[in-house]
């Protein structure tokens, strides 16, 4: 139903009332203070350096057109992504999700693009159910599939089967095709399976599950992936399109600073966004009037970005040098696995991206520079994620129609209907 004009105006007046009590300019000043006073390094209450700059802490910018036209330092790139049908519950008590992982190449590699790793993760209420879990080859050997029986949990079932399917398919596909990568691998998402690592900070049942053999084996896949690429001196990075970490804002808040940002992305966006006042002055944060569209005086001619940082807090603490790595044996110096990152703000779309890489690669200034130039060139040219990531996403994505067809196929095979809820009907109709 269309919102009546009188109600639209009523809601708009609410927004204007709220805006009178929120001074966005103060947020920018606070962001500058946090950047200047807290991030070199950021120390938590236990005295750990949870965020620490690599080299000089600084913000930089580059002309969008110049970035797009520069020659990328890596002759070829590969992307990796995994997509799922989303968790599905059936009336017979089964909960499952199916993930397919794919790797892309730039320049294109059609044989590689054909290959898939499929994982169906199943949670069964019946404790007597035992499913075969071996890999099976199909499609003339180009692809393989397997079933993973999820550890038993009483809650969070859908989240568990989703995470296990997604990360097992992705990590196994990466290891299976690592030899196809000659210059740079870009994961579509974080460097490590943060959803699994975050279980340690969740409910007691999930904390216990994080140390179960199956989730542990998936995390170990990522550890081995880092070791393999370090051994071959081929960098790999994670390109996070929707970063949601709260490490900086949470830690600063614990120090008594009332951080107004919902997460670190909002903080860095405020820090890197550049504006023009109507008179031409740079970096003004206030609009001329409440009726002026937000962002109307935002500068869009330059990408802005930070230096690299080491991250040792939140989910990143597990693979920090002093972390326990879930008991997984690390063949390299533990410091080599630490998560490092920098962020890039694209004002054309008003979005911020986070790029992660193992410290073993970013400890070298030349490698850091090459990775920066590659990412900046691709973001500028693609107006979004690198081409290899876009390709991998397209290869791995399962369409809405495909998801529906697969669920119907499972209903026929399992002899049980999907357990539907009213929202399934509601959202399918809108």
Image: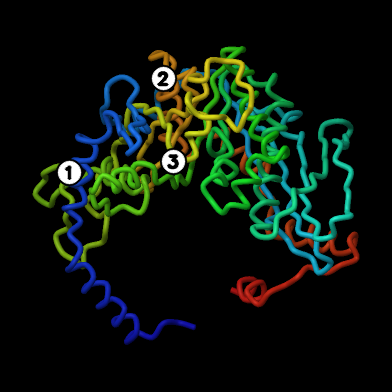
Q: Residue at x 28, y 33 (%)?
A: 39
In the foreground, 386 or 128: 128
Q: Residue at x 33, y 43 (%)?
A: 251
- State the image coordinates of residue 209 (x, y, percent, origin top left): 66, 46
- The circle on residue 167 is none
- The circle on residue 283 is 1
Q: Residue at x 24, y 37 (%)?
A: 35
Mark 2 and mark 1 residues within 8 Å of each other at the beta carbon:
no
The answer to whether 55 is drawn above or below residue 43 in the figure is above
Lateral position of residue 48 relative to residue 61, left or right: right
Sequence order check, earlier mark of 2 and 3: 2
**Element carrying mark 1:** loop
- State the image coordinates of residue 340 (x, y, percent, origin top left): 44, 28
**Element carrying mark 2:** helix
Sequence order check, earlier mark of 1 and 3: 1
Lateral position of residue 361 relative to residue 130, left or right: left
**Element carrying mark 3:** loop
Q: Which residue is mark 3?
A: 383
In what quadrant of the picture does the C terminus appear?
bottom right
The answer to whether 7 is drawn above or below residue 103 in the figure is below
Instruction: Mark 2 vs mark 3: give the one in front.
Output: 2
Q: Residues within 10 Å of mark 2 (few under 14, many from 20)?
A: some
C-alpha span from label 2 to label 3: 22 Å
Instruction: Mark 1 vs mark 3: give the one in front.
Output: 1
- State the image coordinates of residue 329 (x, y, percent, origin top left): 63, 22
Q: Residues within 10 Å of mark 3 (few under 14, many from 20)?
A: some
**How was this image coloured?**
rainbow
Sequence order check, earlier mark of 2 and 1: 1
Residue 227 falls in image quadrant: top right
Q: Which residue is mark 2?
A: 368
């Amino acid at each position: 139903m269309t919102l009546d004009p009188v109600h639209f105006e009523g809601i708009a007046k609410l927004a204007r009332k709220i805006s009178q009590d929120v001074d966005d300019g103060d947020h920018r000043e606070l962001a500058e203070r946090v950047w200047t006073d807290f991030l070199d390094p950021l120390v938590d209450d236990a005295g750990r350096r949870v965020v620490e700059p690599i080299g000089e802490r600084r913000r930089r910018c580059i002309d969008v057109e110049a970035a797009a036209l520069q020659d990328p330092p890596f002759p070829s790139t590969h992307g990796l992504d995994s997509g799922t049908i989303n968790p599905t519950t059936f009336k017979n008590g089964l909960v499952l999700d199916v993930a397919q992982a794919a790797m892309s190449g730039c320049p294109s590699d059609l044989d590689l693009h054909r290959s898939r790793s499929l994982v169906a993760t199943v949670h069964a209420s019946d404790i007597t159910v035992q499913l075969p879990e071996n890999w099976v080859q199909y499609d003339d050997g180009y692809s393989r599939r397997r079933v993973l029986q999820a550890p038993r949990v009483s809650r969070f079932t859908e989240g568990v089967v989703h995470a296990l399917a997604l990360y097992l398919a992705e990590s196994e596909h990466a290891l299976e095709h690592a030899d196809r990568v000659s210059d740079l691998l870009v994961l579509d998402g974080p460097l490590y399976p943060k959803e699994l690592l975050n279980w340690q900070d969740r409910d007691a049942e999930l904390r216990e599950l994080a140390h179960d053999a199956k989730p542990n084996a998936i995390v170990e896949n990522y550890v081995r992936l880092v070791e393999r690429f370090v051994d071959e001196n081929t960098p790999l990075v994670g390109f996070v399109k929707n970063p949601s970490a709260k490490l900086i804002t949470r830690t600063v808040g614990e120090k008594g600073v009332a951080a107004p940002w919902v997460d670190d992305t909002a903080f860095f966006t405020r820090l890197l966004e550049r504006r023009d006042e109507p008179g031409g002055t740079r970096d003004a944060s206030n609009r001329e009037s409440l009726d002026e569209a937000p962002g109307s005086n935002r500068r869009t001619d330059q990408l802005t970005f930070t230096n690299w940082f080491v991250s040792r807090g939140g989910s990143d603490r597990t693979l920090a040098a002093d972390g326990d790595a879930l008991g997984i044996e690390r063949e390299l110096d533990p410091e080599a696995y630490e998560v490092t990152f920098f962020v890039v703000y694209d004002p054309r779309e008003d979005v911020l991206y986070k790029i992660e890489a193992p410290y073993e690669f970013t400890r070298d200034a030349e490698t850091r520079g090459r990775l920066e130039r590659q990412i900046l060139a691709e973001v500028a040219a693609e107006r979004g994620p690198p081409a290899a990531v876009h390709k991998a996403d397209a290869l791995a994505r399962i369409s809405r129609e495909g998801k529906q067809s697969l669920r119907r196929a499972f209903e026929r095979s399992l002899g049980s209907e999907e357990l539907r809820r009213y929202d399934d009907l509601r959202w399918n109709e809108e």
